[in-house]
Image: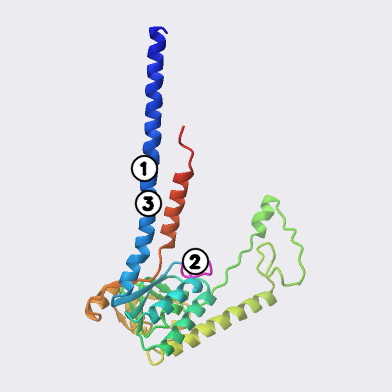
């Protein structure tokens, strides 16, 4: 064997050794990472159980759009309300609202559940409006025993809206026509390619009025003897927290942290909502990491 061949063999041997070492280190690192990740998944619920077993302020957050497929849906919020109500270690239930509304039905379902819990338990339920507690967000908030907001919070919007668009003129310019096959003369009542007749408009207006009237009935029931006799409250207007206080829409100006220190002897705050989105992102990232084919 020539010197050149010997040198080449040595280089190849070194490269193979380095590749084996890199592969072994990568496997070890992935095992350590996997074990670390699994330990986190076990520690998160364990930490929650520890907190739930101590006296605490139960906080349930209503964030963003209230709709059937969101974190603020009735399906997600109602079990949290029941869990907080059944937990003997929760001294008070605080519903922290930061929502401009969404589905009237979802809001109504959550509202009714809060009213039901108040009838079944003596546990105090308080709503705190942060940035926004409007429309469906306020609908949920008004079910509580008391409502608080900050001076600059946006509160109210006691009204109902149903959106529809007429895009015919725009698509006419593009030469696009709708060819929808349908049965029932009112089946396309909200189709953006069809004109809304006066009869259809009256029907939709009747629907929104009925939902609006139910909103007002529940508001008067919840805020009995607190609302000022001002019809503008029911008109869909929204107000600052300070204005809402003068109109009787809220009971005071405060925050979660003020109530914590002034009324509940600085009990720890326990958030009942689970950050599912964060966990899902970690799982997806981990799955991608372990399945990517980057070992050459």
| Residue bearing mark 2 | 70
Instruction: Find the distance from the CA under tag 1 to the CA under tag 3.
Output: 10 Å
Q: Where is residue 270 in the image (x, y as percent from the top left)?
A: 32, 71
Mark 2–mark 1 CB contact (< 8 Å)? no
Q: Nearer the viewer, residue 144 or 34?
A: 34
Q: Where is residue 238 in the image (x, y as percent from the top left)?
A: 42, 75
Left or right, residue 282 beside residue 210: left
Q: Is residue 278 above or below residue 239?
A: above
Mark 2 / mark 1, whichever is N-terminal? 1
Mark 3 / mark 2, whichever is N-terminal? 3
Instruction: Find the distance from the CA under tag 2 to the CA under tag 1.
Output: 37 Å
Q: In this view, does 63 lie above or below 278?
A: below
Q: Is the magenta stretch mostly helix, strand or loop?
A: loop
Q: Nearer the viewer, mark 2 or mark 1?
A: 1
| Residue density around tag 3, few if under 14, some if 14–19, many if 20 or more, within 10 Å | few
Residues in magenta?
Answer: 65-73
Left or right, residue 250 beside residue 235: left
Give the number of the disc on residue 29: 1
Q: Nearer the viewer, residue 126 or 271?
A: 271
Q: Nearer the viewer, residue 54 or 22?
A: 22
Image quadrant where residue 96 sits: bottom left
Q: Position of residue 296 (x, y in %)?
A: 46, 32
Image quadrant where one finds the N terminus: top left
Give the number of the disc on residue 35: 3
Mark 1 / mark 3, whichever is N-terminal? 1
| Residue density around tag 2, few if under 14, some if 14–19, many if 20 or more, within 10 Å | few
Residue at (64%, 63%) from the top-left corner?
166
- Give the residue at the far top of this rendering: 2
Residue 66: in magenta span: yes
Image quadrant where residue 50 sits: bottom left
Q: In this view, does 247 lie above or below 196?
A: below
């Amino acid at each position: 064997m020539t010197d050149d061949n010997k040198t080449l063999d040595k280089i190849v041997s070194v490269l193979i050794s380095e590749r084996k070492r890199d592969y072994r280190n990568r496997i070890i690192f992935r095992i350590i990472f996997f074990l670390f990740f699994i330990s986190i998944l076990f520690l998160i619920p364990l930490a929650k159980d520890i907190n739930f077993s101590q006296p605490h302020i139960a906080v349930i957050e209503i964030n963003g759009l209230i709709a059937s497929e969101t974190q603020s849906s009735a399906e997600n919020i109602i079990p949290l309300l029941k869990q907080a109500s059944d937990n003997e270690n929760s001294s008070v239930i605080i519903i922290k609202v930061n929502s401009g509304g969404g589905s009237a039905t979802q809001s109504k379902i959550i509202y009714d559940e809060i009213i039901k819990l108040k009838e079944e338990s003596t546990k105090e339920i308080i709503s705190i409006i942060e940035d926004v507690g409007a429309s469906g967000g306020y609908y949920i908030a008004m079910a509580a025993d008391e409502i608080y907001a900050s001076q600059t919070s946006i509160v109210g919007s006691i009204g109902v809206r149903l959106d529809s668009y007429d895009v015919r003129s725009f698509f006419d310019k593009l030469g696009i026509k709708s060819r929808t096959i349908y049965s029932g003369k009112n089946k396309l009542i909200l189709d953006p390619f069809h004109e809304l007749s006066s009869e259809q408009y009256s029907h939709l207006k009747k629907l929104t009025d009925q939902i609006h009237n139910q909103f007002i009935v529940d508001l008067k029931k919840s805020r009995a003897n607190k609302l000022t006799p001002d019809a503008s409250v029911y008109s869909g207007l929204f107000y600052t927290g300070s204005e809402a206080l003068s109109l009787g829409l809220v009971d005071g100006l405060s925050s979660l942290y003020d109530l914590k220190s002034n009324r509940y002897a600085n009990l720890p705050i326990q958030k009942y909502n689970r950050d599912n989105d964060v966990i899902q992102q970690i799982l997806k990232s981990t799955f991608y990491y372990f399945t990517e084919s980057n070992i050459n």
